[in-house]
Image: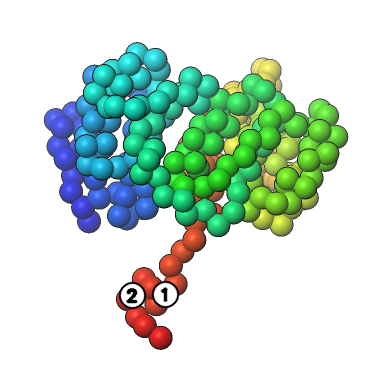
């Protein structure tokens, strides 16, 4: 199942890339800068792509001191490294759609994740239902996508609209953006779970990483049964 490296404060699962097709991802919130840097070094030293989420600038500075070429996306709050190891494996384009500009941090997290999994990714920002013509004017981009991630706060209506326009999987991501009655994303979450559009699935509030990862798996070319078991025709 692969090797686990014991760092004392963390057990890095180097075998995850064999089981899941992608290395272990570092969730940075609650970790010290030194802990993040030590885990990042372990992952990159083993020859894997690094993705760290919910990172801050202090953690990034610690990582780049030990990992050459590490890159920080301050909007997505992600740290990535070893991007040269990314293998293109997407069967089509993943489109990430946002209802508003305030949803961009979650959307960017999804973009970074899906790209590191080897997928072509496009971003379509600020096309929410308050100005639905903005979405409809880009119908051709929606139709070309193989998987669509829709990121929205407030009442969370946009995924239902998109789901009614396309015939591909739609992953809905509720965000904690909105006024008091949005209950920090709960209203959007419930609205998306109650979508009447077929083919819409929902991840947790603000979980851009989960959406990007799921989209990457959906968009991946899978080996045939014969290839998996080494059988020949």
Which residue corresponds to the image point at 33% horizontal and 75% vertical from the top-left?
229
Assess whether mark 2 and mark 1 are in contact (beta carbons under 8 angstroms). Answer: yes
Which residue appears farthest toward the top when viewing the image?
58
Q: Quadrant of the N terminus?
A: bottom left
Residue at disc 1, secondary structure: helix
Instruction: Tell me: 53 left or right of 215.
Output: left
Instruction: Tell me the quarter of the image containing the C terminus.
Output: bottom left
Decide: is 61 above or below 214. above
Real-space Cα distance between discs 1 and 2? 6 Å
Q: Position of residue 105 (x, y in %)?
A: 56, 25
Left or right: residue 209 versus residue 20 is right
- The circle drawn on residue 229 is 2
Mark sitting on residue 86: none
Observer able to see residue 52: no
What residue sits right under mark 1 in the picture? 225
Mark 2 is surrounded, within 10 Å at the Cα level, by few (under 14), some (14 to 19) or many (20 or more) other residues, namely few
Residue in the image at 53% along x and 36% along y:
110
Compared with 211, 224 (above or below) is below
Q: Where is residue 169 in the image (x, y as percent from the top left)?
A: 63, 53
Identify the residue at horizontal 62%, vertical 39% (top origin): 122
Q: Residue placed farthest to the bottom in the image?
A: 233
Seen at 34% across and 37% down, the residue is 82
């Amino acid at each position: 199942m692969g090797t686990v490296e014991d760092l004392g404060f963390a057990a890095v699962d180097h075998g995850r890339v064999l089981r899941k097709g992608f290395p272990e991802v570092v969730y940075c919130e609650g970790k010290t800068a030194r802990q993040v840097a030590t885990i990042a070094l372990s992952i990159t030293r083993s020859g894997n792509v690094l993705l760290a989420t919910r990172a801050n600038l202090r953690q990034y500075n610690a990582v780049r001191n030990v990992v050459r070429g590490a890159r920080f996306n301050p909007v997505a709050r992600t740290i990535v490294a070893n991007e040269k190891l990314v293998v293109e494996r997407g069967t089509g384009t993943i489109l990430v759609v946002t209802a508003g500009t305030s949803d961009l941090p979650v959307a960017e997290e999804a973009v970074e994740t899906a790209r590191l999994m080897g997928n072509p990714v496009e971003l379509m920002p600020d096309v929410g239902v308050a100005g639905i013509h903005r979405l409809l004017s880009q119908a051709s981009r929606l139709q070309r996508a193989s998987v669509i991630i829709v990121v929205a706060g407030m009442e969370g209506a946009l995924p239902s609209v998109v789901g009614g326009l396309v015939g591909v999987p739609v992953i809905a991501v509720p965000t904690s953006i909105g006024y008091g009655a949005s209950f920090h994303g709960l209203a959007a979450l419930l609205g998306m779970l109650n979508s009447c559009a077929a083919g819409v699935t929902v991840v947790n509030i603000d979980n851009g990483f989960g959406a990007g990862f799921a989209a990457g798996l959906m968009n991946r070319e899978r080996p045939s049964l014969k290839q998996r078991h080494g059988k020949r025709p």
